[in-house]
Amino acid sequence: MEVPGWQLKPGTVRETIIGHYRETVRTRRPVCHRSEFVGRDRRVYRYDRVLLPLATDGDLVDMVLGGAVFGRIPNLV
């Protein structure tokens, strides 16, 4: 996954995101996360993600439905 000035590298954000999916499956509950960071262009970006567990049999989570919103936070100064 690439966003302006930001890449998912092994050992960093990538493992965190994988952990969010694992948490969704393990807890069988929706998970929502927000992160903000400064890109190479020195602008602040926000990333919101929600993960929803789905189970074909109503019990064992065998799918995760995810949605994300990514955007730049306007300068307030």
Image: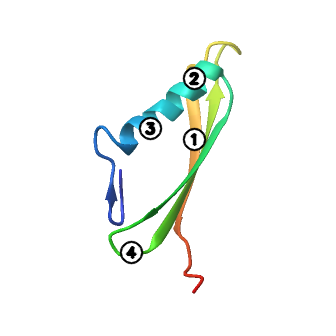
| Residue at 53 percent of width and 62 percent of height | 46
Residue type for callout 4:
Arg
Residue type for callout 3:
Thr
Query: Which sits earlier in the primary sequence, circle 1 or circle 2?
Result: 2
Q: Tag 1's secondary structure?
A: strand
Q: Nearer the viewer, residue 73 or 70?
A: 73
**Percent coordinates x, y for residue 22 in the rendering:** 51, 26
Which residue lies under the disc numbered 3?
Answer: 16
Which residue lies under the disc numbered 1?
Answer: 66
**Percent coordinates x, y for residue 9 in the rendering:** 29, 45
Tell me the quarter of the picture where residue 53 sits. top right
Tell me the quarter of the picture where residue 75 sits. bottom right
Residue type for callout 2:
Val
Q: Nearer the viewer, residue 43 or 48?
A: 43
Question: Which label number is shown at residue 25?
Answer: 2
Which residue lies under the disc numbered 4?
Answer: 42
